Image (tube, helix red, strand yellow):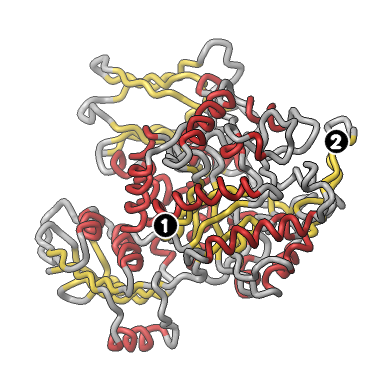
Amino acid sequence: MMEQLNRYERLEQEGAFVTSDTLIVGGNELLHQITMKVLSREKHGNAYAAVRFINRVDEQLQSRIRIAFGDVYKDDEDGYVIETDEDEVRVCAASIRGLVYGAYNLQQLGEKGFLRKGIIYNVPLCSFRGLKVYLPADEDIAFFKSFIDMACYYRYNTIVIEVGGAMEYRRHPEINEGWAAYCQEMREYSGKATEVQHGSKWEKNSIHCENGGGGWLSQATVRSLVVYCKERGLTVIPEVPCLSHCDYLLTRHPELAERKDDAYPDTFCPSNPASYALLFDVLDEVAEVFEPGTIHIGHDEFYSVGVCDECKDRDAAEIYAEDLKKIHDYLAQKGIHAMIWGDKLINCISKRGNTYGGSTRVIRDKEGNFMQFVPPTYKAIDRIPQDIRVMHWYWSMPREYDEDYLSRDMYMVYGNFEGPGIPEWSRRLSKGVQGASISNWSALREDYLQRNGIFFNMAYCCRMFWQEGYEKSMYAALAEQAFADLFRYKNRDVLSGAHIEITYATTFKRDYAWFFDGTFIEPDKDYLGDYKITFEDGSVITHPVKYGENISHFDRSWTTRMSDEFDVYEFDRSLIEVSYTTLPVREGSQTYYQIVLGNPFPEKKLVSLEFMPKKDLDACVIVQKVMMRD
């Protein structure tokens, strides 16, 4: 269904096949590898002679675009054209990024190698289509690369990678040593980091102990990951948390902490020159490894404001603005843009009157007892360099806060983005927003990305980024498209051979839970039992049934509703949690989940399928359908 993403398309019913006899001309090895996956496994008389990659969109092609679609062509490094005629397929773009998108579009269009004749012109609605992640653990590097390939498949152009303590620092190896020891302590058991975060007498930042798997990668390894991204046309933005979220700097430098009595300090003192001496050394090494055009410097969740003796009499907004200008100016000397999380620049008040972000805040504990006064910082928005780029993750607050940035002509994208949640996407995009970034605040691993809804949002938001006219009423239909895309993407190898389809659901149910900030997937809690599949000769295969991973409850919602507290649509995350490994299917008021298993015995008759529950499971699994496929 990815063909529905073609913004401008004029195709005939007739076509031809891309086969092993089809030459792949132009481009590079990467483009050839992507195109090879389009090839038909069979011989066909009506085959294209060539697939040709052309690194330009010349005036003649632009004229053909105007004839086909009107005056829609614009110079855009992400745009691309696919033309097919009697003899060949041509993919044309002005950049490697556009050619990569075009090659993946061939994959998405090609049904067993068949491509229809005609012309396709694609250009995105927004220039920034990002994904925010941590550095992978050493053992997850192979998956990192497959994730980057998936990002290109869904036409994302930017990857924001939080560095923190998870990359080798040659000038300050103590940062890595402290980071590893700190993470080992925070990762002692699931939920410990959250306990530490909420266990103080003041508000603390979340703890990112999943970054780098709780360890760190060598500079050579990180550089190779950056190269892998850039070869595919991705813009890579390293994130180096500054001012706040600086626990990685302070584990071995507590003398720089704003709170001297914090056992786990996370904010450095902005009045201490030594804070910047350390930080600028770190920024230098990150810049050397990433060679970035932009560095994200954090600055979110800044709670310990004006606490130490040097800062306590200073204006909070002035502290924030002065710190930002200092770091901005340092990066500007290197020709690097600064990007920040924008929460502290907004005087944010929710529907219920609660204050957030840069507002004046009174922090209380669960019992309502006073803990801390956080002074306002929002007035800093008029004291900082206006070329600082903003990642606005308070889009889920009153939507008029967009104007705080746009009215000042600041470069702004949405952060922590979830497509189904945003009201008035089309209108807001037309006002000057540059795009959005989906964020994963957990391990860069397949199971975490699935269950945190990252894969779903990648497929869903792709449609919002490339197709006009998005409205929230489209949610159910677009969700079904995203589910189908993801299911085919994940199971493409299984689906291409003999396999067994099982469509089922369970009466077991629990509330959805995020996996982030030290809350880990606990397989024993998700395991419901096993399917035992028996064939006529006694051969058996088994398959584990895991709640939230490959099965969920019958009762799931396919609609959205406006939140009572925030300016955002809420939706059923337990539904999207199982997408990718399963295909959610609506049957009246109930939802079932289809999985596919490779069939090692396609010539044998299946005689029974039995669910064997784990001990003391107070629930059942109901099978709706079982199918054998060749």
Tag shown at residue 371? 2
Mark 1: few/some/many CA within 10 Å (<14, 14-19, 20+): many
| Disc 2 secondary structure class | strand
- The numbered mark, 2 or 1, whose residue comes first in the sequence reads 1
Asked whether, in this view, residue 549 is left or right of residue 313, the answer is: left
Q: Quadrant of the N terminus?
A: bottom left
Q: Is residue 135 visible?
A: yes
Residue 290: x and y in percent read 41, 54
Residue 295 vs residue 618, the one in the foreground: 295
Name the image quarter holding residue 525.
Answer: top right
Q: Quadrant of the C terminus?
A: top left
Q: Residue furthest right?
A: 369
Name the image quarter holding residue 18.
Answer: bottom left
Tag shown at residue 154? 1
Residue 509: x and y in percent read 63, 28
Distance between the alpha carbons at the discs numbered 2 and 1 = 45 Å
Tag shown at residue 580? none
| Disc 1 secondary structure class | loop
Q: Nearer the viewer, mark 2 or mark 1?
A: 2
Residue at left offset 42%, top offset 51%: 485
Q: Using the image, determine if residue 162 lies above or below residue 620.
A: below
Residue 629 vs residue 126, the one in the foreground: 126
Residue at left offset 69%, top offset 68%: 405
Q: Is residue 480 visible?
A: no
- Kind of residue sitting beneath label 1: Tyr
Q: Using the image, determine if residue 23 lies above or below residue 601.
A: below
- Kind of residue sitting beneath label 2: Met
